[in-house]
Image: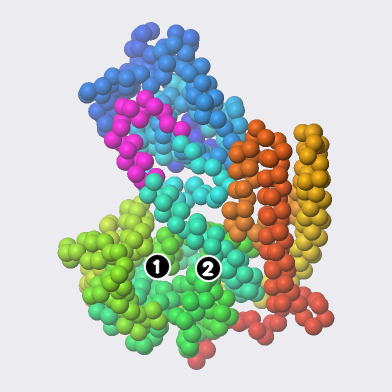
């Protein structure tokens, strides 16, 4: 137990959630101090296993785990530190590597991370709290625990799907690798097989989004650029967190089941916070229902059809992602509140306005709507029109802009519906259903009610008719709009001051873009000269080749020093960024061939880099330059909602 106190002091300072977990376990676990041959025995009643701490011949301790059917050592009985060094050497370390560690043991090989290299991120998964507790008690983990890029999933109380999704970045320039503690995997095979399943499910889910994100990153960036005046003069969603604590929220989507109970929503007016997604807006308006909040996050032009022609909603707030399709924000008559999912170019905004809390999404605005309701403190959170399936062969409720029938040529999957029968869904809806199942599993502090009265069964929700929900939970006066309006007025930035700040930042950014364009042009000229030298002289030595590359890459540090440039190209050029790494590994025995490949990378990447900078410069100048070539935002064209309803 010699290291328990020192390790716990670090956990208390850096990882309080883990400190609390270990301290609670320490107060209830049975630890028996034995003799020189067996230092201690930890009895894990939860999993019916015994953990023995034994001295290794070369010093330190080894760990033996005894189950009902097995008895296995987790480390070398001779020299566990040398064993860990060998594991680390064979594994290899990379500064951009993201590592998922499966099984901690006593933590000897975890200590190797600090000694060998920095890393981008590491997640330690140890499903047996007793094993990690033993590491805290009997190994000095101080240096390792002092790192800032760690995240721990200890025990089986955490939801791996959601944590992997939020903590692992599936960008093409960041390698993801697994480091397995072989004895742990061998002894607890079933447990780790399930962990692998959850990790794979989460990574696959995120992969769909990341490749879609690469494809649409330019659109998100351009929308943010166009939305800047509204973003800078509007409050953050963060300002409204916990505002509706204990107040029911009805989250309306546009599934076919909405037709069954849409009239009931009217009865919840001024008794609950009513939110809807864009697809449900025209359906609600058709029935003379004005939601308190409309949530919109899609940057595609097709999103506009859900809002086009909508009038008379100046009292309804638009809760919008920074990269929402710009015409929606341009035309919205009421107040606009902004959140982010850390999309492309959002970093430029946060550099000036400060951090925005990232809102969860599983690929649909309905997920973000529910997460926002949760962060607003609402309880219960009620789902309406959330079918995630094709009930009665239809895609959406009557009156939705995207209303239609299912495509009989598509592949469908049968899932359980809210009545215990089966209903057809597809892979897209199934992934959304998976997200909800995992999201609700992690939030047992709230009541989630599925009042859709149709569609797929969502786990961890209570099934109830909307009429009964309103009778049971919506029985107090709740002036949701007044509450929203009051907080909006408090948190809304000063209109003129905000736009002046924005004008200054845009002017500075234009200068940086112009500088970046000039330097990139110079680099392309240098690349062309280097290509000619390589082509015309087949006998260049390795030293001469490296000098050529150094000349080409000399521009890199200058470009990296212009901070704003990355905001304009991040995620858009990820595929091109991979080609350099490929060329280095593919031709590492042929210096000349490797350099030729890298020249192709430099040239291809910088041509596209230059193109993106020029497009952004052109867009900024088109929107924000006046006739005198000065940055000026037309105040009359920016909706200046001050909190009053227009009737």
| 155 horizontally vs 48: left or right | right
Q: Is residue 197 magenta?
A: yes
- Image spot of residue 48 (x, y percent): 24, 28
Q: Residue at x 54, y 25 (%)?
A: 89
The residue positioned 36% from the left and 33% from the top of the image is 129
Q: The residue tagged with tag 1: helix, strand or loop?
A: helix
Labelled disc at residue 281: none
Indicate the position of residue 391 as horizontal and vertical percent values: 25, 72
Which of the two residues, 375 or 471, is positioned nearer the viewer here?
A: 375
Looking at the image, residue 191 sits to the left or right of residue 554; the answer is: left
Characterize the magenta stretch by its predominant secondary structure: helix
Residue 328: horizontal and vertical position, in percent?
53, 79
State left or right for residue 88 relative to residue 374. right
Label 2 packing within 10 angstroms: few (<14), some (14-19), many (20+): many
Q: Which residue is mark 2?
A: 321
Please identify the residue farthest to the bottom as the structure is shown. 647
Q: Residue at label 1?
A: 366
Residue 521, image x and y in percent? 79, 59
- In front here: 572 or 253? 572
Label 2 vs 1, first from the N-terminus: 2
**Which residues are drawn in magenta?**
179-199
Please, is residue 302 above or below residue 243 in the view?
below
| Residue 34 position (above or below residue 647) | above
Q: How far apart are the alpha carbons under marks 2 and 1?
A: 13 Å
Q: Is residue 400 visible?
A: yes
Residue sitting at 68 percent across and 64 percent down? 612
Quarter of the figure that contains the N terminus: top left
């Amino acid at each position: 137990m010699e290291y328990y106190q020192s390790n716990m002091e670090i956990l208390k300072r850096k990882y309080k959630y883990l400190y609390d977990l270990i301290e609670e376990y320490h107060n209830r676990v049975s630890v028996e101090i034995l003799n020189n041959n067996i230092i201690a025995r930890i009895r894990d009643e939860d999993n019916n296993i015994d953990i023995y701490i034994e001295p290794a011949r070369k010093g330190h301790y080894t760990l033996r785990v005894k189950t009902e059917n097995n008895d296995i050592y987790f480390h070398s009985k001779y020299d566990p530190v040398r064993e860990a060094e060998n594991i680390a050497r064979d594994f290899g370390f990379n500064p951009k590597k993201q590592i998922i560690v499966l099984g901690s043991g006593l933590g000897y090989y975890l200590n190797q991370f600090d000694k060998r290299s920095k890393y981008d991120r590491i997640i330690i998964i140890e499903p047996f709290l007793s094993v990690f507790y033993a590491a805290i008690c009997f190994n000095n983990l101080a240096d390792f625990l002092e790192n800032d890029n760690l995240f721990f999933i200890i025990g089986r109380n955490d939801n791996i799907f959601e944590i992997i999704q939020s903590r692992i970045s599936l960008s093409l320039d960041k390698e993801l690798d697994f480091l397995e503690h072989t004895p742990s995997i061998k002894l607890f095979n079933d447990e780790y097989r399930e962990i692998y399943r959850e990790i794979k499910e989460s990574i696959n889910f995120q992969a769909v989004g990341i490749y879609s994100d690469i494809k649409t990153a330019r659109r998100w960036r351009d929308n943010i650029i166009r939305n800047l005046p509204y973003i800078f003069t509007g409050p953050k969603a963060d300002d409204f967190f916990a505002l509706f604590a204990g107040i029911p929220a009805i989250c309306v989507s546009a599934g076919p089941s909405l037709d069954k109970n849409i009239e009931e929503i009217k009865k919840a007016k001024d008794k609950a916070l009513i939110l809807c997604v864009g697809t449900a807006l025209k359906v609600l308006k058709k029935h003379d229902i004005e939601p308190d909040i409309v949530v919109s996050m899609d940057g595609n032009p097709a999103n506009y059809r859900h809002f086009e022609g909508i009038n008379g909603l100046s009292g309804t707030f638009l809760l919008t992602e920074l990269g929402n399709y710009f015409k929606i924000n341009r035309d919205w008559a009421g107040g606009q509140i902004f959140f982010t999912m850390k999309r492309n170019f959002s970093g430029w905004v946060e550099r000036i306005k400060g951090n925005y809390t990232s809102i969860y999404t599983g690929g649909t605005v309905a997920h973000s709507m529910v997460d926002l309701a949760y962060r607003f403190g609402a309880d219960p959170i009620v789902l309406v029109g959330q079918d995630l399936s094709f009930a009665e062969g239809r895609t959406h409720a009557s009156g939705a802009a995207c209303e239609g029938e299912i495509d009989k040529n598509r592949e469908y999957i049968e899932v359980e519906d809210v009545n215990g029968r089966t209903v057809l869904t597809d892979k897209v809806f199934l992934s959304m259903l998976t997200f909800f199942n995992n999201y609700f599993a992690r939030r047992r502090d709230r009541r989630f009610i599925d009042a859709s009265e149709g569609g797929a069964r969502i786990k961890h929700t209570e099934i109830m008719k909307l009429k009964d929900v309103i009778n049971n939970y919506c029985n107090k006066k709740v002036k949701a709009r007044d509450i929203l309006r009051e907080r909006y007025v408090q948190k809304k930035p000063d209109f003129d001051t905000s736009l002046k700040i924005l004008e200054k930042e845009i002017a500075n950014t234009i200068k940086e873009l112009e500088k970046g364009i000039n330097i990139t042009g110079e680099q392309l000229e240098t690349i062309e000269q280097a290509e000619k030298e390589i082509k015309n002289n087949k006998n260049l030595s390795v030293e001469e080749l490296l000098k050529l590359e150094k000349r080409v890459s000399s521009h890199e540090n200058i470009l990296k020093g212009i901070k704003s440039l990355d905001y304009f190209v991040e995620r858009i050029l990820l595929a091109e960024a991979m080609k350099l790494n490929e060329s280095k590994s593919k031709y590492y025995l042929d210096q000349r061939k490797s350099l030729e490949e890298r020249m192709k990378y430099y040239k291809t990447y910088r041509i596209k880099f230059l193109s993106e900078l020029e497009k952004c410069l052109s867009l900024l100048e088109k929107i924000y330059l006046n006739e005198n070539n000065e940055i000026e935002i037309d105040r009359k064209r920016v909706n200046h909602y001050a909190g009053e309803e227009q009737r």
